[in-house]
Amino acid sequence: MKPWISLFVGALWVVFSAEGGFSGALGRRPLVAERIAFNWHNFLSGCSTWNFEDWQQWTEQSQKYGYNAIMVHAYGNNPMAGFTFEGRSKPVGYLSTTVKGRDWSTMHVNDVRRLIGGEVFDRPVFGCAAGMAPDDRRVEAAQALMGRVFADAAQRGMGVYFAVDVDTPTANPPELIGLLPESARFKAGKGLWLPNPDTPEGYAYYRAQVGGLFKAYPQITTLVVWFRRGGTPWMELKTTDLPDAWQKEYAAEVARAAEAAKDWHSAGLFAIGKIVRAFERARNECGAKRARIAAGTWGFEFLPASDRFFPSGVPLIGLDYDVIREKPQLGSAEGRAVLAAVGAHRPVIPIIWAQHDDAHYLGRPYTPFEDFHSKLVDARAAGFGVIHWTTRPLGLFFFSHARQVFADTRDEPLRVSCDAFAKQELNEPELGGYLYKWIFEAPRFGRETGDRLIDRPLTNCSAVVAGCRERLKLLDGAKGAHADYYRGWERFVAAFFETHDLFQQAQAALTGNDKAQARVLMARCDPESVIRQYAAFSSIGGITRGEQGLVVSLNTRWLVYYVRLRQILGMEPVRYDFGPTSHDPLAQAPGRFTFFFDGERHVWQTLGAEETGAETVDAPLAQEEIARHGLLIDKPITLNVRSITHPAALPSGDYQLRLLMSDPDSTAAGQRVFTVSVRASGDEKDATVDVFKEAGGANRLLERVFPVTLRRPDGVAVTVAPVKGKAVISGLALERLKE
């Protein structure tokens, strides 16, 4: 390791100097058995973009903090959970990158180096090496990576939890389930066919899955059957959907205990209990008896029915989801009693959130629990885990909770932990007081699971900014890289809230039809400088993969909405790039948009076959970058030009439409001829175009300019119709002229 202390405060990988040292948990006496660091595959800012070295450092740092197991979750479409059944490979998606994979609103971009703040990247695509493997090798690549990760954890004596979805459509692919005879499957209402694990053939499906996972990852110590809270074929099962034999079993259970029928998702969890038993049987037959089978989901409503229907001894793992409403179940005596009722006779492991992907993603982590060990004892918990995606600046959260479950620092007060963290982890003891104020008062904001990074109004913006400035005073005189990092963090947060407050005011003015005021407010907005601030302070000590992922997110899920509003107000041109786009049919809540950032970092939205219905073409020999791809049009197509992303009308006024065309392979004039019609507010302008002739040869960009007048808020319709050969258009830009 390099002899300097990295600023990787955020939890899980810090490079330590010999003189900086580390006061870890090794050799200390833990008070709870299960202490799990849990990262979750999906986002560009999470572990989906990690390479082996990143995983290795995360595992090492987790162990030094006092965690004794790592946990990873795979959705049904994740290639790391691929397997074969009856000679057929399970359909899978992709690990998220900026060119492949779409899970949970992953947006794509042509070259991350062109993004605002893109200097933090050294290559055009951001993602892990395994995520960029050829499509036909993506399972092999993902499993090779995670096999190394799990082997490294096992070599360190760490437990390995691997959670796999069992109830979603991607976990029950028709391509495989359809191979079973009808006697070995049943239908979920009018939906998917599901395998019946109580039949020999249905069990064979689970045997193949479990066998494949243990073959790929023999280091697994706990294989977790994971399911959602509802809305999936298995969780929405009604009693009448169950196979006849199951209906009789379920009725007998209800006859013994009438409350069974009232349990949360009772019939669905009865059925999932069958999957749990199949996993246990398959584990035994695979020669992996040392590994446990566990089960888990969001929240703790599942505990009564799971306790009733799942095999005894199976650990139950619940995500303490209500932290998003500031009401974690571990935080109340009533909530802990729910866990204790089941924890009295089987392991129950609550998972606490360091951050929340649905609302509290950016900013500081949640404030650590006080008297955490005592709360776990009260809940009769077998241990705990911490779920997260990014790392910095979450380190204090991991540090505090780990210390509270060791004998010599049992229930350590948070103020003491802040001082210890500042001294032992940061080697800047003067930061303890600042951290104590920061962990209670600094904001948490944003989400990573939707089209927009900010999907609800930011409130109390002036108070947030004032808080940042007050905390900055506590850093006066503090020296060191970590103090510089937190100064940058506070300034970024203040700038973010100031900027977004102006944006919200501009939106309100537009809603009130005061476009002049909206333009004044938007002229004061500079989100680009905010993103540059983020990239700059995140680079202190070495930027993390999560921070790089957030640079992408800030551009493609925040900045683009400022660009959109500028376009709606006539302050910025609408720019569309035409070319190939990548989509993922198995992705959950898939990202819809692809963006092209040009050499001047202008934002263009890319439209391809999925978006237009036209074929796309690559022209790598074209002189101009934007001409190296386009739409190949063999029949008339109309493109409606409005704002990017979510289309909206443009303001009235005089415009200039620039249509960009190219011809990648003609050898003479007349081989590619087409007409262009531009319609706006009832007016139409037509032109016939021979790109080869007008551009002076192939692979050259031709720009045609059309004056356009909108007499009312509207859009512009551009119709391209081939006359001879196929038309090729590469892009267009519509700019409102100054009044």
Image (spheres, helix red, strand yellow):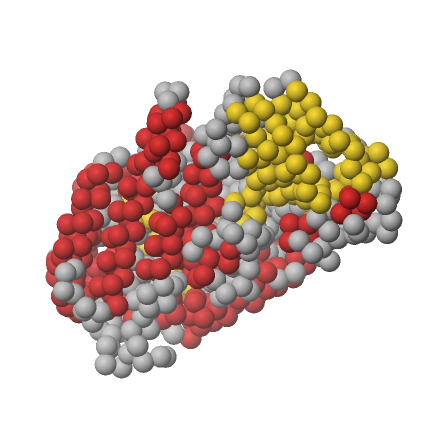
Considering depth in this image, is 685 or 552 the residue closer to the camera?
A: 685
- Residue at the location (15% across, 50% down)? 470
Quadrant where the image shows the N terminus = bottom left
Q: Decide if residue 648 is in sight here.
A: yes
In x, y percent, where is residue 672? 83, 42
Query: Can residue 309 be seen by looking at this rendering?
Result: no
Residue 379 x, y percent position in the rendering: 23, 48
User: Left or right: where does residue 648 sit relative to residue 173?
Assistant: left
Q: Nearer the viewer, residue 100 or 257?
A: 100
Q: Residue at x 23, y 36 (%)?
A: 460
User: How many numbered marks have been drawn onto this rendered protein structure?
Assistant: 0
The residue sitting at 33% across, 73% down in the picture is 15
Residue 91 on image: x %, y %: 64, 50
Q: From the viewer's perspective, is residue 506 above or below residue 101?
A: above
Identify which residue, 673 or 264, lies in the foreground. Answer: 673
Residue 233 location (% of width, % of height):
54, 36
Q: Residue at x 75, y 53 (%)?
A: 699
